[in-house]
Image: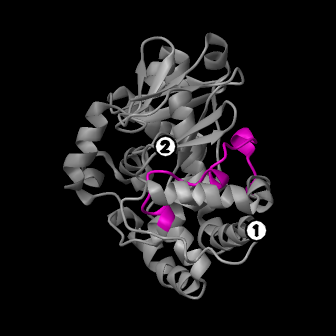
Amino acid sequence: MVLLRLSSLALSRSRFALSPLAETLGSMSVLTKPCSDPWLLPWYTRHHDAFRAVLDADPFAKGLVELIGSTKYLPGYITLPPSGGMRTAFADELAPVVAARDEAVSADLEAAVAHSWQRHDLRWLTGHGWGARTADLFRYTWHTHVVADWPRRRALLERDVSYRAGLLAAYGWPRALQQMNRRSAWVGTDAIRFSHQPGPDRVVGEDGMLFVPVCVTSGTWLSEEPPDRYALVYPARGAAAVDPGRREPARALERLIGTGRAAVLHELARPATSTELAGRLGQSLGTVGGHLAVLRDADLIAGTRVGRRVVYRRTEAGDLLAGQCTA
């Protein structure tokens, strides 16, 4: 069992962050395999063929992406913890990848091959400047397959952070970490269980731990930067709700509580503020506020104050009603 150990100071300084590079990495891994998530299918269908064509034309890119998709050890030079907090810029994350020395890249890739559940070799690792070539692949993937979708993904990621920040403020880190993934859990008073697999414990530095949500992945990985910087990358809550081809609210629910309130209730499959709801639904803030008041009085939603904002979420009754009327 691998534990991440935190001192009280490290715990007090732990925080959330966003990573466009991690989002791109997850997207690359998804695009290289058959799509198993129905909510991803519209995006996957639009981008898969073009992405595969680029890989087929470049043995280095193809070998790297296929290795990423089939190993328990993601190469360290592409999984450094982000340093920009909630405003992390893709270009800033890409700079260390460009600067990675060939010896370090080779060592990381050999470790990834050793931990792969498929047979791999590194015959595609030819020439030199592998860090820069990796950065070119990430840059292409970001600009061609991710950036147009980034505002919508970022909104979902921010909602996940707001939701967990509310839990953190009310209940502390153990509750905020719940359901990040199936493996992670709080252990005792000073450690996070990252994996059931055997391995040495990691000691988080006094600057604290980073928690990084991503949309396009069902997995979790640990980003490390020696000697003691760590980031836990995890699937964002409600990621399946970002489907661009999402259906309109079910007619049964519309007839029961009205079209506007049904839309709000469905939209709260992932937590959001009234302003975010108004923007997504194309309704005025006053109209959305009225719907929220009725749904709250009916105990179908609840609001949690996070700083100056109130983040709304569905209650168990709201989930049940929305699910029954959608079936």
User: Can residue 273 be seen by looking at this rendering?
Assistant: no
| Residue 57, percent from left and from top | 58, 88
- Residue name at image x 52 percent, y 40 percent: 160
Q: Residues within 10 Å of mark 2 (few under 14, many from 20)?
A: many
User: Can residue 249 be seen by looking at this rendering?
Assistant: yes
Q: Is residue 68 magenta?
A: yes
Which residue is labeled 2 in the image? 234
At label 2, which amino acid type do we have?
Tyr
Q: Earlier in the sequence, mark 2 or mark 1?
A: 1
- Residue name at image x 74 percent, y 53 percent: 93
Q: Is residue 292 above or below residue 96?
A: above
Q: Which residues are magenta?
A: 67-90
Say which quarter of the image contains residue 141. Answer: bottom right
In the image, is 129 to the left or to the right of 299? right
Label annotation for residue 132: 1
**Could you say which is closer to the camera, residue 54 or residue 270?**
54
- Residue name at image x 56 percent, y 36 percent: 161
Q: Is residue 235 magenta?
A: no
| Residue 305, percent from left and from top | 56, 24
**Could you say which is closer to the camera, residue 182 or residue 251?**
182
